[in-house]
């Protein structure tokens, strides 16, 4: 049975390719080395891991901003709404240069 909260946030049925809108929590960010090509990365998950960790594997999407060493407002712990083209990098879903909106933390996110 489908999870209505996941569907509402865009996580219900992620396509292998195509335009999607996702709402999620930035679990981690990756800064490029000074000598590397400027590509800022963030890992987006549908929600915050509960105390003690997750019991089941959850779908995550890697966000990558080409030509950026830092993206304003995107840090671990931030809630985002992202829109862009989803594709696969190996077997992992990735969205390059997504449009994003920083969301306020709400009671239902905690």
Image (cartoon, helix red, strand yellow):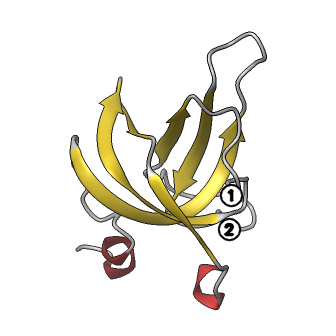
Q: Mark 2 — residue? A: 50
Q: Secondary structure at mark 2?
A: loop
What residue is shown at x 60% (from left), y 37% (from top)? Answer: 41
Q: Depth check: give the residue in front, 52 or 94.
A: 94
| Residue 28, image x, y percentages | 68, 46
Q: Secondary structure at mark 1?
A: loop
Q: Depth check: give the residue in front, 42 or 49.
A: 42
Q: Depth check: give the residue in front, 29 or 13.
A: 29
- The label number, if any, that marks residue 53 in the structure image: 1
Could you tell me how many numbered marks the image carries? 2
Residue farthest to the right, as pictured: 34
Residue 14, can we see it?
no
Q: Is residue 45 left or right of residue 8?
A: right
What residue is shown at x 44% (from left), y 49% (from top)? Answer: 98
Q: Quadrant of the C terminus?
A: bottom right
Residue 9, placed above or below residue 52: below
What residue is shown at x 40% (from left), y 63% (from top)? Answer: 22
Residue 53, placed above or below residue 89: below
- From mark 1 to mark 2, how far is it between C-alphas? 6 Å
Q: Depth check: give the residue in front, 69 or 41.
A: 69
| Residue 67, image x, y percentages | 57, 28
Residue farthest to the top, as pictured: 35
Kindly indicate whether the residue at mark 2 contacts the one at mark 1 (C-beta within 8 angstroms). Answer: yes
| Residue 14, image x, y percentages | 27, 53
Residue 59, can we see it?
yes
**Residue 93: which quarter of the image?**
top left
**Residue 39: which quarter of the image?**
top right
């Amino acid at each position: 049975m489908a999870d209505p909260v996941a569907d509402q946030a865009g996580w219900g049925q992620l396509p292998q390719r195509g335009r999607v809108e996702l709402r999620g929590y930035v679990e981690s960010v990756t800064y490029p080395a000074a000598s590397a090509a400027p590509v800022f990365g963030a890992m987006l998950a549908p929600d915050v891991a509960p105390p003690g960790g997750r019991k089941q594997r959850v779908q995550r999407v890697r966000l990558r901003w080409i030509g950026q060493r830092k993206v304003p407002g995107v840090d671990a712990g931030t809630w985002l709404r992202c829109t862009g083209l989803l594709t696969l990098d190996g077997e992992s879903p990735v969205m390059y240069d997504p449009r994003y909106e920083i969301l306020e933390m709400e009671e239902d996110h905690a």
